[in-house]
Image (cartoon, grey):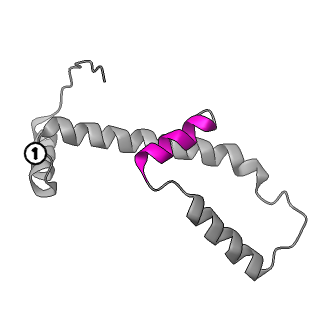
Amino acid sequence: MVTQMITLKLENRFLKSIDELVQRRGYQNRTEFIRSALREKVDDERYKEAAASIRPLLGASKKKTTEEEYERAREEAYRSFPKTKEESDKLFRSVGL
């Protein structure tokens, strides 16, 4: 994977907080922590976009759903939900996010 170096300026107080988290959470260094934080933020934004794209569908169905049907659908959705970052990225790419 090709990477690019960027410059990032942070206040000393904020950088100290990052250093404490790096130490407590077992990250190897600041860079690993910052990459992880940025990945999480990108994933959160993708999720928000996906949720916004399906929001108009909420309540669109005229059919009443039984509790049993709801539970069955919930379990199926959970089984198909991405379990890894790679699966999540693949899913988001497939819907254009």
Left or right side of 43 for 81: right
Give the residue at x 48% y 40%.
89
Give the residue at x 64% y 66%.
76
Q: Is residue 35 magenta?
A: no
- Residue 45: x and y, percent? 49, 41
Left or right side of 7 for 59: right
**Magenta stretch, overall SS:** helix
| Of residues 12 and 59, the one drawn nearer to the viewer in this rendering | 59
Q: Which residues are magenta?
A: 84-94
Amino acid at dot 1: Asp
Q: Counting other residues with Cα less than 10 Å from the Cα at mark 1, is it few (<14), some (14-19), or many (20 or more)?
A: some
Tell me which corner region of the image, top left, top right, bottom left or bottom right, holds residue 8.
top left
Left or right side of 20 for 32: right
Whether residue 9 is visible? yes
Is the N terminus in the top left, top right, bottom left or bottom right quadrant?
top left
Q: How many numbered marks appear?
A: 1
Give the residue at x 20% y 39%.
32
Residue highlighted by disc 1: 19
- Residue 74: x and y, percent? 65, 69
- Residue 69: x and y, percent? 76, 76
Q: Secondary structure at mark 1?
A: helix
Left or right side of 2 for 66: right
- The answer to whether residue 57 is above or below residue 86 is below
Whether residue 44 is visible? no
- The answer to whether residue 64 is above or below residue 20 is below
| Of residues 18 and 27, the one drawn nearer to the viewer in this rendering | 27
- The answer to whether residue 86 is above or below residue 96 is below
Is the C terminus in the top left, top right, bottom left or bottom right quadrant?
top right
Give the residue at x 27% y 37%.
35
- Residue 85: x and y, percent? 41, 46
